[in-house]
Image (cartoon, rainbow, N blue to C red):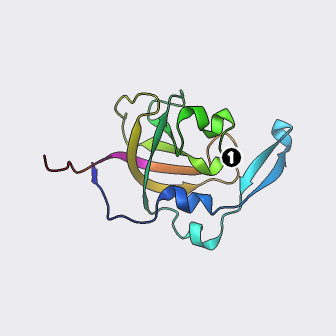
């Protein structure tokens, strides 16, 4: 497991700076929001990133979970937030069981996605749960 890194700019703050444009996808006969990744975010691709957010109870695969900046009732999938507020997390191995809206912290290598609408725009690969240091009691 990863240890918590020094405090840095949150992943959500980084994702929020990304502009999105609407683009028509002929194969789906529908419009989707597509991120416009700049050089600054592309420089982070493939590097470790920590994301702390709410676990979304979705069946996306045995080693894949969705993490949201916002709780389920206000998340992207309920129409309450934008695509910059969710990340797809692909674990190295089967993750522990999480409860809906449980706040989890994960670290993985950032992969950016601006072309495959069957996946989210921000993907953490080879991810692991981050262990938080316990406060002295």
Residue drawn at (54%, 42%) of the image: 70
- Mark 1, residues whose alpha carbon is within 10 Å: few (<14), some, or many (≥20)? few
Q: Is residue 11 above or below residue 43?
A: above
85 or 116: nearer the viewer: 85
- The range drawn in magenta is 126-131
Give residue 4's quadrant in the image: bottom left
Q: Main secondary structure of the magenta part?
A: strand
Would residue 89 be counted in the magenta stretch? no
Q: Is residue 54 left or right of residue 1?
A: right
- Residue 58 at x, y percent in the picture: 54, 28
Helix, strand or loop under label 1: loop
Residue tagged by mark 1? 116
Position in image of residue 83 (x %, y %):
65, 47
Q: Return the x and y of residue 59 as percentages of the image width and height.
A: 53, 26
Residue projecting furthest to the left:
137
Q: Residue at x 68, y 46 (%)?
A: 116
């Amino acid at each position: 497991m990863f240890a918590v890194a020094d405090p840095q700019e949150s992943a959500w703050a980084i994702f929020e700076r990304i502009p999105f444009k609407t683009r028509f996808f002929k194969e789906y006969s529908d419009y989707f929001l597509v991120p416009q990744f700049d050089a600054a975010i592309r420089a982070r691709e493939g590097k470790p990133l920590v994301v702390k957010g709410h676990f979304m109870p979705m069946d996306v695969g045995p080693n894949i979970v969705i993490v949201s900046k916002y709780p389920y009732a206000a998340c992207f999938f309920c129409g309450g937030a934008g695509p910059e507020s969710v990340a797809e997390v692909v674990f190295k191995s089967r993750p522990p069981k999480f409860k809906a809206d449980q706040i989890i912290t994960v670290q993985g290598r950032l992969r950016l996605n601006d072309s495959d609408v069957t996946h989210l725009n921000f993907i953490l690969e080879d991810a692991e749960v981050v262990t938080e240091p316990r406060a002295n009691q």
